[in-house]
Image (tube, helix red, strand yellow):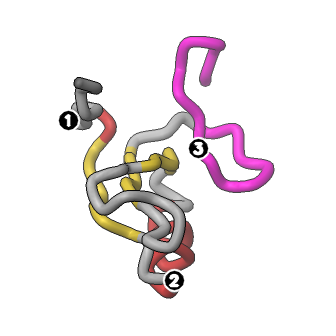
Amino acid sequence: MSDETTPICSAKGCRAAAVWVLAWNNPKIHTPERRKTWLACEEHREHLSQFLGVRGFLKDVVPLAEWEPAQDA
């Protein structure tokens, strides 16, 4: 069960707790070091990874517990 402090999956309509971070960027609009993130539950990790991967956007998939966002300089 999730509450307002629990990160939720980025898949459309999903309200499950996120357990994965999918780091990505669109090379046409983002600098190479820029990382956008989507969160994924176990069920949607593969689907979201494939969506980003087919477009060449997916850079990394990391367990949420191990994710360390880049520090802005």
Asked where in the image residue 66 lies, by quadrant, the reply is top left
Q: Position of residue 43 (x, y in %)?
A: 53, 59
Q: Label 1 amino acid?
A: Glu
Residue in the picture at 61% in, 22% down: 2
- Give how far apart the Cα atoms at labels 1 and 2 are: 25 Å
Give the structural element (helix, strand or loop) at label 2: loop
Give the structural element (helix, strand or loop) at label 3: loop
- Give how far apart the Cα atoms at labels 3 and 2 are: 20 Å
Residue 8 shown left or right of residue 39 in the figure: right
Pointer 2 residue: 55
Pointer 3 residue: 9
Give the mark nearest the N terminus, 3 or 1: 3
Residue in the picture at 71% in, 47% down: 14
Q: Which residues are magenta?
A: 1-16
Residue in the picture at 49% in, 87% down: 54
Residue 42 shown left or right of residue 17 in the figure: left
